[in-house]
Amino acid sequence: MFEFCSDPSTLSTFDWFSCYLTNGKHIQFYKSFGLIILLLVLTAPLALMLGLAAAVAIKSNFFLLRLISKTYANIVRGIPDIIFFLFIPITIDQLIEFTRHKIKCPEIIDSVWQGNDFIVCSVAKLPLSSSPQWIHDMYGFSLAILSFTIVYGAFAANTFHGAINSVPRSQIDTGKAFGMNKKQIYFSIIFPQMWRYALPGLSNLWMLLIKSTPLLFLLGIQDIVFWAREIGGSKTSIFQYPHPDWRVWYFLSLLVFYLLLTKISEIALNRVSKKLYLPI
Amino acid sequence: MKKILLSAILLGFIYSPVNADTVRMGTEGAYPPYNFINDNGEIDGFERDLGDELCDRAGLDCEWVQNDWDSIIPNLVSGNYDTIIAGMSITDERDEVIDFTQDYLPPDPSAYITTGDGNKAAYIGVVAAQTSTIQASHVAESGAILVEFATPDETISALRNGEVEAVMADKAFLAPIVAESNGDFKFIGKDVFIGGGVGMGIRESDSDLKDTFNAAIDSMKDDGSLNDLIKKWFGEDASIY
């Protein structure tokens, strides 16, 4: 980054570190913090929407809708996150590619499962192997968001379900007495009031979501954990900046990052709850 | 966001420029000098040079993909990338699951290292090796207690922390570590030759790609450029063709 960085072995400690901490690898490390924030910002509203939809569906009059939403909430909440994260992206990926294969290459009658290989024709691959790497990255990231949304949507569904049930029954009966239909009751009575009851549960969920973001690493996404391990590992002089095992410092920086993130969230959530007159 | 996601997926269904000549090269990026992620965050090393040259000769457009070692074969067979070029020795067990091109590195010595004050014959003690490597199975068969780690770097840390008494890995990987350890580490015992050379892993159903790379490796062996490359990364004493 700086001009004097061309030969790091001659530098003084301070200069060495200013070069080291701004090399290409570190820039990628810093960017991956943005990835975590992006994941949180995208997943939270999606999971809230999914959770709310499922909570309303649990109270639906249609048997099938009730069955699906209850099954979803209970199964997903009951499965360890890690197993779910290993399972969902692979399944969805293969499902999409299988469907595309059937549409785009109907002339190939061989099974897509040949021994160990999962083979779809090259135009059915998603992303195509000719796509640039960032498309592959974005695709993997989207699958991760989807997995997080499904998992946290189930927890949110449960929270919302409880919150909806906490809205005083007498108010709903009053609404009915006034001749309101179901939609009006939801939008005028239940939704505006349920947040008070849902907020403690949701803020808990937000903290859990923050803490589960390192699972991205499990999906092979180059997140902060990947870079901390990669950069922190000991480096011989084949690298420009040789150093011993510094993983402990890099993991320490992740620790500080997560503590800051949860602290800021706590302050923000406290403010929101004060507005709703509900101390957490 | 749902809309964006959905349209991205739909776009994937519709927009499909056909360019079959892109080959995705999967590598670990944690095993210098074979392959590693350099200070600019790019894949580098012997296999990067070799892979780029092979693709050039075969007229292929190659894209590099980093993937952790323990899932490198599953992700090849499920089609996340098309080749494994990650210092992977050709063995019968692996050959049952995937195919290999001909070897681009002759069978390479593996070696044990131990801490400077250790005098014990390492191969009877507790030995660290990377998961699912030929060294790991060699250690297991030798009767020593094997401790496996996901990355090569973690095996070295384990030795430094005294968690294990020795590490077994490719000698080319260990040599710079021993040389720069200020006497903390030393080689112990004789070099061991295991595995049938290093080749590129390719899906069994992908025999065209295998033939293409075999031809490219042949041409690099014939004009001596492969030997030059081996000497550049592994030193003048490395075994060549």
Image: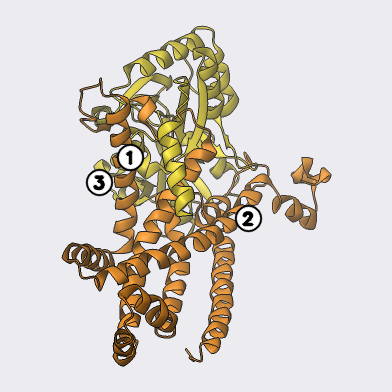
Classify residue B37 as left or right of residue A165.
right
Q: Between residues B171 and A27, which one lies in front from this camera angle?
A: A27
Give the CA separation, mark 3 to mark 1.
47 Å
**Callout 2, which amino acid?**
Tyr
**Callout 3, which amino acid?**
Gly
Disc sitting over residue B143 in the figure: 3
**Residue identifier under label 1:** A96
Q: Residue at x 31, y 86 (%)?
A: A172
Q: Is mark 3 on a helix, strand or loop?
A: loop
Classify residue B48 as left or right of residue B83.
right
Shade representing chain B: yellow
**Disc 3 sits on a residue from what chain?**
B
- The chain coloured orange is A
Give the CA separation, mark 3 to mark 2.
45 Å
Q: Is mark 1 on a helix, strand or loop?
A: helix
**Residue identifier under label 2:** A30
User: Residue B200: image x %, image y %?
Assistant: 40, 25
**Disc 2 sits on a residue from what chain?**
A
Q: Do the residues labelled 3 and 2 touch (CB within 8 Å)?
A: no
User: Residue A134: image x %, image y %?
Assistant: 54, 40
Determine crowd level at label 2: few under 14, some 14-19, many 20+ residues with C-alpha closer than 10 A: some
Q: Is mark 2 on a helix, strand or loop?
A: helix
Q: Can residue B121 be seen in this view?
A: no
